[in-house]
Structures are given as C-alpha cells and as structure tokens.
Image (cartoon, rainbow, N blue to C red):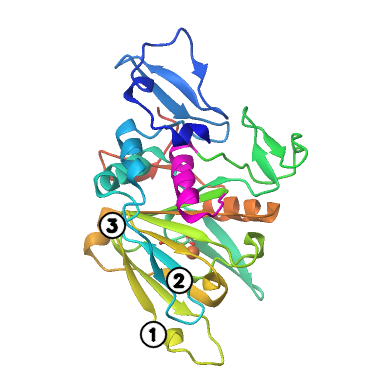
Amino acid sequence: MAMSKRPRTLDSFFSPPPKKTRTIDSRDDVAKKDDTSNCIIQQSNHQTYPFAIPFLPSDINEMLNFAPASEGRVINDQPDLDLIYYQPYIPKEAQKDLFEFLRQELFFYRVKYTIKRGNVETLINTPRFTTVYGLDETARFDSSGAIVDSNTEKAVTKGTYKCQPRPLPQCLDHLRTLTENATSQKFNFALVNYYASGNDSISYHSDDERFLGPDPAIASFTLGAKRDFLMKHKPTSSDYISEKQPMKLQLASGDMILMKGRTQSQWLHSIPKRKTGEADKGRINITFRRAMVKGGTENYYRYNVGDGEVFRWNANRREMTPWRGEK
Ligand SMILES: O=C(O)CCC(=O)C(=O)O
Ligand SMILES: [Fe+2]
C-alpha cells in the first residue's frame, strides 16, 4: 500500500504522454492518454468492470490527507451498543467533490431476487442502487487481476467462485487504507449504496452474517444527502427501552460511523424512507467490511451486483440511467 500513503503530486496526472500505455499499479490500473486534453488519465480497470474508473483526482486525494477531520466520539451508553461516530470523517472541502466523483464514476445495479417463505416465492426489488468490490480472506487479486489463494498464492480454479469478484478501484482502495489506519481494523470489501431519493431505503437488519466472524467491525460512510439512521436493540427478555424507542442519528455528508463489538449481533439498523426534501439530492453510503470465507464473497455479489443491467449517473438528466456500453 505504499502508493496510497504517498501524497500524489500534480505531476503524475499531467506528465508528458508516455510512448505507449503502461501499467501503473497492481491489477489493471493503467495510465491512458486522453486525446482531447493531452494529459494522462490514470484509471482502474478489470475484466469484470463494465467501464474503467478514474483514480481519485489529486485535489480530493490531497484533502483526504486531513482525514479523519474530527475525533471519533464513542457511543456505548446503551446495552450492547459499541459505536465510534466521526462527525465528520471526510474534510468539509472534499465532501461534495468526493460525492460527485463517486456518483459519476462508479457503476451501479438495482438488484432483484426471490425469497421463499414456506411455499410462496416473493420477488424483492432492492429499494436502492448498489455495487460491491472485494474478496474474502481466503483469496486475493494478483498484479494481473487474477484471483489467487491467500496461502498457496496459486490461481484458484475456475468455478471456485460462482460470482465474478472485482478488485477495489484505486479511489475506494485509498479510502479503505485511510480507514484501516484510523480504526486499526482490516477490511477486504467495499459495499456502496446510492439512495437516489427519499423513496430509496434499507429496512431494519443487522450485518451479523457468519462469514464476517464474531463481532465484526464495519465502517460506514455518508456522502451527499443527510438521512436518518435508526438503530434499535433486538428483542430480548430484558425489555430494553431501545427495543421500542429507536435511536436516531442524522448522518450527514462526510460522516463515518464505526459499528463494532456486539452492535451487529444485538442491534438492528435502517435508513427509512422519507417523503421529500434533502433526500432527493441523493446519498452515497460506503461500508468497509471484512469477510472471512468464500460464502461472504458469493453473498455480497449476489445481493449487490446480481445479474441485471448496469446503471450509471447521467449528468444531463441528473439520474441513474441504464448504461449500454457508451464511452
Ligand atoms: O446507508 C447506510 O447508512 C446503511 C447501509 C447498511 O446498513 C448496509 O448496507 O448494510
Ligand atoms: Fe447494514
């Protein structure tokens, strides 16, 4: 991770055109000549990406050197609750640019899947845009973008994964490294949600899947619109107040909440639908997590990429539109 620690200078973005396209970083990160402006665009690419994702612009990158922008506040005054709330984590000057960069440059999905309750199959339309990058601890991407076993370093055999895992693009990998350093936690996945309006939401759930191991730490970022984040204790025989009266955090752009300890095993969280206003500006949520086994990888791609069409932000129409291979 030497690359992400060194502040990148303007030079590496606007240097003379190279003789030929050359590989800059591990995986398929490449420097490409942009014919219109005659400058070098560094981008992350991989055979699984619908399109390449530019590196973080150098000004955003430099502003992120000042993250975390505030000290984390511990919230553990309720049974089993264990949070650190950075209000904000992303410096003020970088919040809007980072939000707009990620909304413009990432590809998203609107995942549909069926669940079976007893004998009835129900079609679920995920009420938000999603995307995911990463691989569980049993494997990693080598410098060519191939998946290799973490222990043997040998390429995993075809069919080891049913899904098609994707490496984190540089822009998310950089934020991951910063977050790891600030929290002393390790992460191998970035899940991204885009809530286009108050009609997009996530219902009460906990991220307590076995593939995360016991008491997982999850770092959760907000960019863009402010949204209410509700938390309530799971039902117990102790009848805690927090089982019925949810706690409300108004997550604002740049905020990060680290959920750890017994938070996932004992609490539920949600982003409820909202009628109008602020939410229509759109909100990005990024969660960094650490999946321990292959089942985690399969689960994350199934529910955050799925097999439907690709969406991309359309700056003219100011909405996510189906992407059909232009650019
Ligand atoms: O959007 C958020 O803040 C929460 C997202 C979330 O809980 C999840 O993706 O598991
Ligand atoms: Fe969650």
Task: Find residue 137 and report its horizontal and vertical position in percent.
Answer: 66, 49
Amino acid type shown at disc 1: Gln
Distance, label 1 to label 2, CA atoms, is 12 Å
Find disc 2 in the rendering and name its residue.
Answer: 269
Please tell me whether the stretch drawn in magenta is mainly helix, strand or loop: helix
Q: In which image quadrant can residue 251 be found?
A: bottom left
Amino acid type shown at disc 2: His
Q: Quick check: 183 left or right of 166?
A: left
Amino acid type shown at disc 3: Ala
Q: Is residue 201 visible?
A: no
Q: Earlier in the sequence, mark 1 or mark 3?
A: 3
- Crowding at mark 2 (Cα within 10 Å: few <14, some 14-19, many 20+): many
Find disc 3 in the rendering and name its residue.
Answer: 225
Whether the residues at callouts 1 and 3 have beta carbons within 8 Å, the answer is no
Find disc 1 in the rendering and name its residue.
Answer: 245
Q: Which residue appears farthest toward the left when viewing the image?
A: 277
Q: Secondary structure at mark 2?
A: strand
Task: Find residue 189 and report its horizontal and vertical position in percent.
Answer: 55, 49
Task: Find residue 19 and report its horizontal and vertical position in percent.
Answer: 46, 7
Residue 66 highlighted magenta (yes or no)? no
The residue lying at 64 percent from left, 67 percent from top is: 214
Seen in the picture, residue 130 relative to 315 is either above or below; the reply is below
- Crowding at mark 3 (Cα within 10 Å: few <14, some 14-19, many 20+): many
The residue lying at 62 percent from left, 46 percent from top is: 135
Seen in the picture, residue 43 relative to 314 is either above or below; the reply is above
Q: Say if disc 2 is inside 8 Å of ligand 1.
A: yes
Residues shaded magenta: 169-187
